[in-house]
Amino acid sequence: MGERVKKLLAKMTLAEKIGQMCQVAGTGGISQGLRNAVREGKVGSVLNETDMATLNEIQRVAMEESRLGIPVIIGRDIIHGFQTMLPIPLGQAATWNPDLIRKGARMAAVEGRSAGVHWTFAPMIDVTRDPRWGRIAESPGEDPYLTSVVGAAMIEGFQGKNLSDRDSLAACAKHFAGYGYSEAGKDYAYVNISESELRNIALPPFKAAVDAGVATFMTAFSDINGVPATGHAYLNRTVLREEWGFKGFVVSDWDSVIQLITHGYSESEKEAARASVAAGVDMEMASQTYLYNLAALTEEGKISEAMIDECTANILRVKFELGLFDHPYTDPVHFPEKGNPEHLDIAEDAARESIVLLKNDYNVLPLNPDNLQNVAIIGPMADDAHEQMGTWTFDGKEAWCRTPLQAIRERLKGKANLHFAKGLSNSRSRSHEGFAEALDIAAKCETVIMFMGEEAILSGEAHCRADINLPGAQNELLAKISKLGKTTVLVIMAGRPLTIEQTGHYTNAMLYAWHPGTMGGPAIADIIFGDAPPSGKLPVTFPKHVGQIPIYYNQRMSGKPATHDSFTYIDNIPQRAPQTSVGNTSFHMDVGFEPLYPFGYGLSYTRFHYGDVRLSAHEIKADESIEIYIDLTNTGERRGAETAQLYIRDRFGSITRPVRELKGFKKIWLDPGQTETLTFTLHADDLAFYNAENKRVVEPGDFDLWVGGDSRADRHAHFKIIE
Ligand code: NOJ
C-alpha cells in the first residue's frame, strides 16, 4: 500500500494533491461545474449525493477523464442505519450489547455501500453529560468506557473484516474533540475543558477508535479553551498522530475551516486554510479555502509541500485500502420494496434491547393480551413513522416502518377492542382540542397505553432545548388521563433524557424507547405483551430537574458530599434560620443530590440476585491482572436479561479520582432459578489515568470494586495495587 501511494504521489502536481484534500457537497445531479472540477482533479471527495447514476458518473469522470484516474470517495452520514433505521445511537448504547451494535453497523454498511456510499461520518463518540444538547441523541451517552465499547463495535461493524471488502464502509470517529462539553448544552458553543478532563474523559473513546482501526477522524466545530478544534495542532497532530499513531485521514466538519474566521481565530480564508493544514486537517469539508489558497501558501513557504504530501498520502492510503482504485463503481441494486427481512430483524432486535423499563408499579407490565378487553392507545408518537426514526435519517424509509399502533393492533386482533386517539397533533402542540376524544376513549377502556415524547426534529444537530420536560401539553393530557384511574402504561420516545419525574406520577409503568427506528413498533409491542423482557439500561443519568445538569455518576467526591441525613429540603428550612457553613453538604435544596434514575439503571420483569464478589487476588502489581467472580441468579418467575456492571474507585490519587468508574459489563440471559458465575478480568493498566502532569500512570494504593445492576451497585470488594 505504501508503495502504491508513494508512486502515485510522485506523479501528482501540487494542484492535484490539493484537489484530493477538497470535499464538495453534492447538489443533486452532476453539474457542469462539478464535472469540470472532477476532471481537473480538484475533488477528492463528494458528500451527500446518493443518486447512484450520478455517483457512478462522477466516478467515471474521475477515473476516465481526470489525468491520473484517482477515484472520488463518497461520504454520507449513515449514523444509525441507512434505509433500515436502527435506534438512535443513544438507544443503541442502552442495549449494552456490543455484538448487536456491531451487527447493526454491518447492516448499515451493506445497505450504504450498495447504494454507492464509501464512507460514513460515524460513529459519533463525544462523551456528553448534558441532555439539553440535541446531539446527545447521536452519542453513546455519558461514560467514557461505554462510549469506547459502543464506538469500537460500530467501527468494526461499518468497516467489516477488511476495509477492501465491497460491503465495507470507512468509518469516521467524530467530533475530535470535546464537542460534548458545549457550554449550557448549546450546540457549537464554547468548550472550557481542562486537559485532565479531556485526557481522562473525552479522549479515551477516540483512542479506542484508533485501536479499533478507524479509517478517518472528523474535527469538532468547537472552540476548545480558545483554540477551535479544526485549528488544533495539539489534538490533531500531537495526540492523534504522534501519541496514538493514527494512520488514516482527518476531515474538517462542514465549513469548520472557514469558521476559524467567525471564531475570531484566523483573519482570512488563506489564514484559515494555513492553520487547518498546519493543525493536521487533511481534508476540508464544504468550504473551499484549501482549493483557493493552498497553492499560494505552499509557494510562499507558509506551508511546506511535505505537509501537503502528507495530507494527500493519508487520503490516498484510505482510498487504496477501501479498494476504490480496483472497484470504483457501484453496481445498481434494487432494495426490496418492504425492506430486507434480515435487516429488519436486526433493527427489531436492537430496538427491543434498547428499551428501558423505568417503572412498573404493581407489575402492570407485561400486559396479558388474553386478559384485555378494551385498550386505548393515546398519544402523538403512537403512529408516526417519521418521528420514531429519530434524527439523522436522510435515507431512512418511512414506508418500511412499523409503528406501535400497527404492531399492537396486530397483537390484539381478535382478542381485545382497540381505540386510538392522538390527543395532540404532535409532541409540541399546546392545543387541548384533541383532549376530549382522548379522554373519551380512555374512559371506555380498562387499559390505556400512551405514546409521548419528542418528535425527531427536537433532538440532533443544533436542536438543543433549555427545558427538557415533555414538550407541549403532553403532561397536561397525561394528568387528565391519570385521574380516570385506569391501568396506564406510558412509552416515551425521545432523543435525550427528559425530566420526567412528574410525568412518572401520572402512570403505572414507564418504558423509555428513545427513537427506536424502523422496527420500533413490534419491538415495543413485544415488551408490552411480554414476548420479550425489557433489557435496556440507561447509558446516561436522568436528572430530576434541568438545573441539576451536568449530573453524572462518575463525579468527584467533594470535601462535603451530600448524604440523606445532611440534605435539607427548601420547605424544611426554618424562617430566619441563621447562616452557618458548619455541617453543610453539596446539594440543591429544591431537588436534592440524586438523579431521577442513575446511570446503568433499568428494570426487568424478573428479579436478579447478586452473590458476593470473589477476587483471584487481593494485591496485584502494576503489570498484573485480577479476576473478579460473582454469581448472578434469576430469582424471579420469568426469563430475563441482566447487564452486570463492574465499577471501581481508586480511593486516593495524586489527583482526586471519580467516586466510581465503569470498567466492565456483561449482559446475560437467565431462566428462572438459573445461576451463572460471571468472570471479569481487570488489568492494573485498566486503572491508569492521566495525572497532573498529563502522564498516564497506574498509582499503587487501595481500590474499591462493586458489581451490580446499575451505578449504585452494592456488592463490594477491596484490593490493592502494590509497587
Ligand atoms: C455537520 C455535523 O456536525 C457532522 O457530524 C456531519 O457529519 C457533517 N455535518 C456532514 O453532514
Image (cartoon, helix red, strand yellow):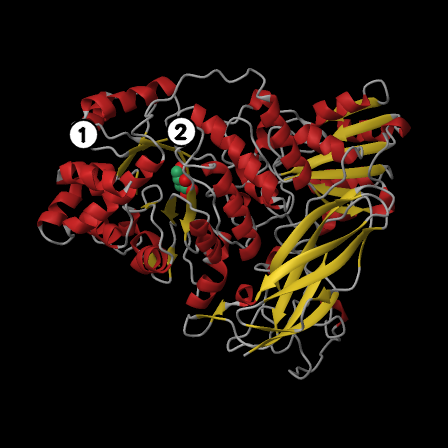
Disc 1 element: loop
The vertical placement of 286 against 606, above or below, is above
Secondary-structure class at tag 2: loop
Q: Amino acid at mark 1?
A: Leu
Give the percent coordinates (x, y) of residue 204. Answer: 48, 57
Question: Is any atom of residue 592 visible in this view?
Answer: no
Is any atom of residue 522 visible in this view? yes
In this view, which residue lies farthest toward the left? Answer: 300
Please name whichever residue, 437 or 603, is drawn nearer the observer in this view of the structure: 603
The percent coordinates of residue 597 (x first, y second) are 70, 54
Q: Residues within 10 Å of mark 1 (few under 14, many from 20)?
A: some
Camera-nearest residue between 445 and 203 = 203
Q: Residue at x 62, y 50 (%)?
A: 539
Q: In the rendered view, would you say 151 is above or below 477? A: below
Q: Is residue 486 left or right of residue 599?
A: right
Q: Is mark 1 within 8 Å of ligand 1?
A: no
Q: Quadrant of the N terminus?
A: top left
Q: Which label sits on residue 68?
A: 1
Quadrant of the displayed image that contains ligand 1? top left
Q: Residue at x 32, y 30 (%)?
A: 324
Whether residue 419 is situated above or below residue 691 in the rendered picture: above
Residue located at (74% from left, 31% from top): 525
Quadrant housing the C terminus = bottom right
As measured in the structure, the alpha-carbon distance from the residue carrying label 1 to the one carrying label 2 is 22 Å
Disc 2 designates what residue? 117
Viewed as shown, does residue 41 lie left or right of 717?
left
Farthest-out residue, right: 371
Amino acid at circle 2 = Val
Report the disc number at residue 377. Answer: none
Examine the image and state in which quarter residue 52 appears. top left
